[in-house]
Image (cartoon, grey):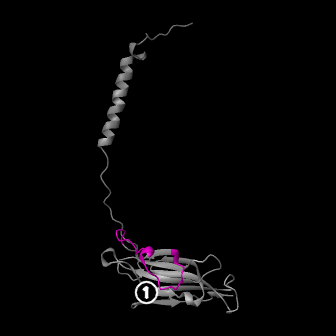
């Protein structure tokens, strides 16, 4: 075996003091990095003029709760059940409205739906029905229901004849509602009705 030409150096052997010094240095770096955090981001995004503006209510205003509403639907001895609900600012006033699809609780069959717009704020008492978009007397069911960008869209399942049983709708119609001059205007996209 050939001996090294370089004499053995004392600092090449680790001793407990080396481990203590390394641990102290790492702890110091971690503590210092915790103190030197970047400030909060303050940049504001400029809206893109090409992006369509959406109507949405501020996050701090809760939409009306359908559980607090008496719906104009006659269920006899039964009760009204909220099948679906969605919220959004439909009239552009900065406060959310709730759209609720409601039907009578039935143990059998397919009860017809009603679709209602609810409005109200926490300080103004209980929410109330401000518009009926689909009347349960029309004998239809609401499907594919959504509230987006200030518009309500839904597909209505109905019947081509009063002789058909309520289990088997044979007509599907896509509809859209939007707020215009104080009322909800209903429109049917081209080719939206099928049998």
Q: Is residue 51 visible?
A: no
Q: Is residue 183 visible?
A: yes
Magenta part mainly helix, strand or loop?
loop
Q: Is residue 38 above or below residue 90?
A: above
145 within the magenta span = no
Dot 1 falls on a residue whose secondary structure is strand
Residue in view at x 35 percent, y 18 percent:
17
The number of numbered badges drawn on the structure is 1
Location of residue 188 in the rendering, given as x and y in whole percent from the top left corner: 56, 89
Q: Nearer the viewer, residue 153 or 10?
A: 153
Q: Nearer the viewer, residue 157 or 43?
A: 157
Residue under label 1: 179
Mark 1, other Cα within 10 Å: few <14 / some 14–19 / many ≥20: some
Quadrant in which the N terminus appears: top right
Location of residue 35 in the rendering, given as x and y in whole percent from the top left corner: 29, 42
Q: Nearer the viewer, residue 48 or 114?
A: 114
Q: Is residue 146 above or below residue 135?
A: above
167 left or right of 148 in image: right
Q: Is residue 95 above or below residue 35?
A: below
Location of residue 22 in the rendering, given as x and y in whole percent from the top left corner: 37, 26
Location of residue 178 in the rendering, given as x and y in whole percent from the top left corner: 46, 86
Quadrant in which the C terminus appears: bottom right
71 within the magenta span = yes
Residue 119, picture quadrant? bottom left
19 left or right of 195 in image: left
Residue 26, picture quadrant? top left
37 left or right of 116 in image: left
What residue span does the magenta drawing correspond to? 58-84
Residue in view at x 53 percent, y 90 percent:
187
């Amino acid at each position: 075996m050939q001996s090294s030409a370089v004499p053995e150096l004392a600092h090449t052997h680790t001793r407990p003091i080396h481990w203590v010094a390394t641990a102290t240095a790492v702890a110091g770096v971690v503590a210092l990095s915790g103190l030197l955090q970047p400030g909060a981001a303050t940049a504001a995004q400029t809206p893109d003029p090409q992006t369509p503006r959406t109507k949405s209510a501020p996050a701090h205003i809760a939409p009306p709760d359908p559980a607090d509403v008496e719906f104009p639907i006659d269920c006899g001895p039964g009760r009204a059940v909220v099948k679906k609900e969605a919220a959004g600012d439909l009239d552009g006033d900065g406060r959310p409205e709730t759209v609720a699809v409601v039907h009578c609780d039935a143990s059998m069959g397919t009860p017809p739906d009603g679709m209602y717009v609810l409005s109200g704020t926490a300080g103004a008492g209980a929410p109330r029905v401000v518009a009926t978009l689909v009347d349960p007397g029309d004998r239809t069911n609401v499907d594919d229901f959504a509230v987006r960008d200030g518009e309500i869209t839904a597909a209505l399942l109905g019947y081509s004849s009063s002789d058909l049983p309520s289990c088997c709708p044979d007509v599907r119609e896509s509809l859209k509602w939007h707020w215009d001059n104080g009322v909800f205007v209903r429109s049917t996209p081209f080719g939206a009705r099928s049998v």
